[in-house]
Structures are given as C-alpha cells and as structure tokens.
Image: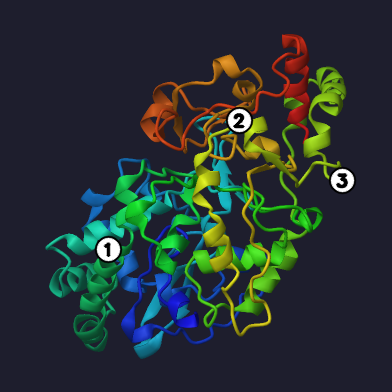
Amino acid sequence: MRHRVAIAAGLFGLTLTFTIACRTPATPPLDNILEHYKYGVLGTEGRVGVPYWLFRVLPIVFADKLPNRPGTGWEKIGFIYETPDRDHPIGTTKANGQFGVDLVGLNCATCHAGSYREAPGSPRQVVLGMPSHQMDLQAYARFLTACAQDPRFTASTLIEAIQKINPDFGFIDSLTYRLFVIGRTRDAILERAKETAWFDARPPQGPGRVDTFNPYKAMFGFDMAKDDTVGSADLPSLWNQRPRRGLWLHWDGNNDLVEERNKSAAIGAGATPESLDVAALGRIEEWILDLKWPAYPAARIDQARAARGRMVYGGACASCHDIGAPQVGQVTPLVQVGTDAERLRSFTPELATRMNTLGEGYPWKFSHFRKTEGYANMPLDGLWLRAPYLHNGSVPTLRALLFPDTRPAEFYRAYDVYDWDNVGFLSTGPDAQREGVRFDTKAKGNANSGHLYGQDLPADQREDLLEYLKTL
C-alpha cells in the first residue's frame, strides 16, 4: 500500500513527481507558528512540488493560459501574496531538494487562508483558518497541464525567462535545469494529467471548492469511467478544532478523529506516509485547536434584533448547531436535509474500506472512515466568513439560506468584497461578475435545494435570526 500511496493523486487529483527529487530532505521548521502555518513544509514537495524557478516563471511565460481573473500571475488562480515582494504566495512551501533544486509545495493554508474587503477600495484582510474561497485548485492543475502541453515549454525559453528575473541564475543552475529539471517536470505533469482525465466528465469545481475523494478513487485504481459522481464541495474553516474532537467530520460525517482528518488532508495535499512531516503537522494541529476567528464588526450588528434572534436560534437551530447540543456533529439523513446528493454519493463503502488502509505500518494508520447516508450538522463558529453556504457552496449568503425563494440560480464566487446586508460575499452585479467566477446551480452537484429549516417562521423572525447569526 505504501507504494500505491507514493504515486497518489493529490487533493485536486494532481501529482508532480519530480523524479530527481522524489524524496525531499528535512527543511528546518519556521519558528513563528503563523509563518509555519502560511509557509511551513509538511512533506508535499516531492509529490506536488514544482521546481522553484519554474514556479516563478510559468505564470509569466504562459500568462495566456491563466484564468481571466483579477491580479497578476498566481493571483489569477486564487493564491494570495502577503506582500508584493514575497517570492511565493501563502499556502506554498519552499524546500531543499536534491541537486540543490528547491521545490515549491502546498500546505494547509492553500485551502484554509481566505480574504475579505470591507468595500471595493478597502485593503484586503487575510484570515488564517478561513476557507480559501478565492483559491481554484482545479485551475492550478489545469494551468500546469496547459503549460506542459505548450510548445514553449522548452529549456531555452524557460531558462531565458528565469535569467530575466534572476541574473544570478548562472551556468551550473542553467545546466541543471536544462539536463535534469525542465524535461522531467514536463513529462511528470503530462503523465499525471492522464490520471485527472475524470475532471473532463464533470462540471468545473471552481474557486473555494474541491473534489476531495474522487482523486482517492483514482489513486486506488477504481474505474473512473464507470463512476459519474461529482464530489465537489466547499472548503471548510479550520479554526476552533478542540470542540470538534469526537464529532463526525467532513461534510458527510465520514470520520470522527480530528487528527486522522488532518493527516488525510495532508496526504490529499500531496504528502505520502513516508514524506509526511508528522511533527510539523502536529504543530499546526495544536495551534488550530484554539484558533479564533475575527468577530463580525459590532457596529454593524443591531443588538436588539440580535437578542431577539438568539431566542429564534435557540428554538430553530441550536439543537443541531450549538457545540454541546445533542445533534451537533451527528449526521442528518439526506432524505431529511434535502441538499444535493452528489457529494454523499461520491464517498462509497468501498472507498471507506480502502481509506482505512492508508498509513499501514505507521502508528497513525487510518481506521475511522465510514460510509454515511447524510450530511453532518456543523458548528457555526465564524459563520459570517464561511460563505457561500451549504456543503457545495451553492447559496451565496445567509439571507438567501434563510429565505429559500431568493436563492439565485447563478451567481459569482471568489469576489472578496463583503455583502454586509445579506451576510456573505457580493455575488451579483458588475464588480462580482468582473472579478468573480460564475457558479451555476443547475450543474450536476451544484443544486441549492434543501436545508429549509425555519422557512415557516415569520419573515421578521428570520430577519432577527439573520442578525444573531452574525454574532456566532
């Protein structure tokens, strides 16, 4: 099994096995836990790592292959740069590989660091642990494939581009890249593209979402030509994990061990049982146990209305969503919740059995995966920054969730200006259309149906409830 995992597809179904550096030597940890979360090495570099100088120039040489989204370079995929002079974005790592070739990999912050702006002209505020609603992992995989398929992916073109941004990239560096790096990287990308062919039979995942478990099926050798499930689901928040211990996790409640969930995510991001830095991941696991989220601005909350809404919440919502309540972290059957069934269908009993073989020979071998028949009731901490809503991100705002007849058939995701009136991100209008990515609820796996609890409440009580939900 270890050897099967060593060629595993990553979280978004892509591995970039860089054959001259398939095992990455230990890289010193970052002392500051915030820096470690944003840039720390977890062991993904040998599998999804892109040689550092190629990572720097690919979005320059192949700018025409990038999505038509705001920003420059990797920002068009959804990566966030902390400062303009930072050499790689939040959620990427830099580790020393063989032959002196640095590799850029992925870590927790790739999927769990988001941003919001108070208004179009306001500065971007980055929130660690927030769902990366702007990040398009599938677009990242597709971009790399498009680069490798392009006739410009040659040593001469890429080395020339590297030397333009790094005049110190000398003879030895150029020779190493020419003889060992560029051709092998191209071949690895193209080979792995064959393993993600199932992408093409499904609607785009889009920013802020990922198909977590269909890549595992491909890894285990399931026949994806006979599997039509769409497992695309919203990226979750990663804060306040301590009270989640013992709750059923993932959208369908298929695992109740926080640490196992974390390791499966790290393997999904590109680590293998052999390469996973358990100690480095452990630092993050400990930190996120009590990681807090930013509070909704108090000045924007009608406190009297929120007080009334708290009473409504207690009667209509708390039993399923309050930490410590009897149904929180438990699974509500699909026939009751009524939301889109595809994510649930995608995780099969056969896959649960195979997931529990991961880590054989290690003390942390998986054993908690199971198949369920519904979706888990999630705690609602930091709810205001977890938009869009439902497991597949098909409802843009909390107002649309509470007033089902207003749920739009299509809207735009990944625009990070906040919609204070409706509690979510602005998802309609010219700015959202220009800077966001269209989401079609009619596409398979994208239905915005279900979770109709509270629809019989009077409108004014639902308005009170909306106000209270801002405070969670």
Q: Inspect the image, locate mark 3, and give the three-letter code of the amino acid beneath it.
A: Gly
Q: Is residue 248 above or below residue 456?
A: below
Please tell me in which quadrant of the rendered image residue 315 appears: top right
Q: Is residue 287 above or below residue 30?
A: above
Q: Residue at x 23, y 76 (%)?
A: 182
Which residue in the protein does label 2 denote? Answer: 338
- In what quadrant of the picture does the C terminus appear? top right
Q: Which of disc 1 and disc 3 is earlier in sequence?
A: 1
Q: CA distance from mark 3 to mark 1?
A: 46 Å
Q: Which of disc 2 and disc 1 is earlier in sequence?
A: 1
Q: Crowdedness of circle 1 by 10 Å Cα count: few (<14), some, many (20+)?
A: few
Q: CA distance from mark 3 to mark 2?
A: 24 Å
Which residue in the protein does label 1 denote? Answer: 194
Secondary structure at numbered mark 2: loop
* In-image side of 454 versus 169 (left or right): right
Q: Nearer the viewer, residue 234 or 319?
A: 319
* In-image side of 332 versus 56 (left or right): right
Q: How many marks?
A: 3
Q: Residue at x 73, y 32 (%)?
A: 297
* In-image side of 431 versus 401 (left or right): left
Q: Residue at x 60, y 30 (%)?
A: 338
Q: Is residue 85 visible?
A: no
Which residue in the protein does label 3 denote? Answer: 324
Secondary structure at numbered mark 1: helix
Q: Position of residue 93 (x, y in %)?
A: 49, 69
Q: Nearer the viewer, residue 249 or 432?
A: 249
